[in-house]
Amino acid sequence: MDEMEWCEMDTETQSLARAYDEKYRLGQYFKYRGWLYRPVVKALVKKANLRAGSTVLDVGCGQGFFTRLFADLGLKPVGIDISGEAIRSAQRDYCTSGARFEVGDILSLKYQGAYDCVFARGLSLYNTKEFNQRHDVTDALLACLKPGGMMIFGYHTNFCPRKKSESWIYHSYSDAKRHFSSYPDAKVYFSLRIEALLLGRYAFRFPFTRIAALISRITGVGGELIAFVPRSPLVAARNSSELDANRQAQ
């Protein structure tokens, strides 16, 4: 990691980066299955009305698995992560994909208004009990969008009461609905992912969300909370006001 980038991170972020560095030194830590996620990403791209050449910022990209899938679809993705080890792995494994990778902290991004899409899947900053009320992360990501751009949120969860995790909070569908209720025109879904193989972009519809949620609750099969959040003028104005307030405070 560049010394300047490291110094710009606060102590908590540096500690988190070290923890992820240790995990990523073990190889492909998350072991994502291409056959399962490739149609999901393709469906997300179509649902978000992205076209070949659209720019995508993949925040918390880890070792670049999803960034590479966007590149395979003809988009122009940039993956960022706080872990230097993850970025080195991504650059090594996907150097010929057309994707770019950078070390960075998403809460101090300098990409305001630069991207057609921001993709945030499994972002650890959303792994918090304050998810319902905390909006600083989502606001920061939306600020990176061009006017009319789209944020795609993804978060692994499980609705079965018997399923617990010591390190990962399984947010409910209601949690996600409450969080994104602050953003006009945001749409929230739940998917078991397999629907994308059969239905493509049409997998993200409310009747399928209800069915998938019921299956997860009964069987314990995990899935993804998915949200499509457009950058509305109201949110853009709010972000601009907060940015001005921060500058004055400095």
Image (spheres, rainbow, N blue to C red):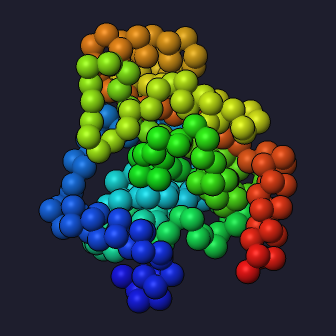
State the image quarter where residue 156 is shown: top left
Q: Is residue 94 visible?
A: no
Query: Could you tell me which residue is drawn at 29 percent across and 63 percent down?
Result: 20
State the image quarter where residue 239 is shown: bottom right
Query: Could you tell me which residue is drawn at 55 percent across and 59 percent down?
Result: 57
Q: Is residue 183 visible?
A: yes
Choose between 220 and 102: the one closer to the eye: 220
The picture places residue 83, in percent across and down from the top left corner, at 35, 69
Horizontal side of 187 relative to 236 (left or right) equals: left
State the image quarter where residue 45 is shown: top right
Which image quarter is the C terminus in? bottom right
Choose between 128 and 71: the one closer to the eye: 128
Query: Could you tell me which residue is drawn at 15 percent across and 62 percent down?
Result: 26
Horizontal side of 73 relative to 46 (left or right) equals: left
The picture places residue 170, in percent across and down from the top left corner, at 38, 33
Above/below status of 114 relative to 70: below
The picture places residue 171, in percent across and down from the top left corner, at 44, 32
Q: How many marks?
A: 0
Above/below status of 133 relative to 80: above
Horizontal side of 95 relative to 102 (left or right) equals: left
Which image quarter is the N terminus in? bottom left
The picture places residue 202, in percent across and down from the top left corner, at 55, 22
Query: Could you tell me which residue is drawn at 55 percent across and 11 percent down?
Result: 207
Horizontal side of 143 relative to 64 (left or right) equals: right
Extreme residue in the left direction: 26
Extreme residue in the bottom direction: 3
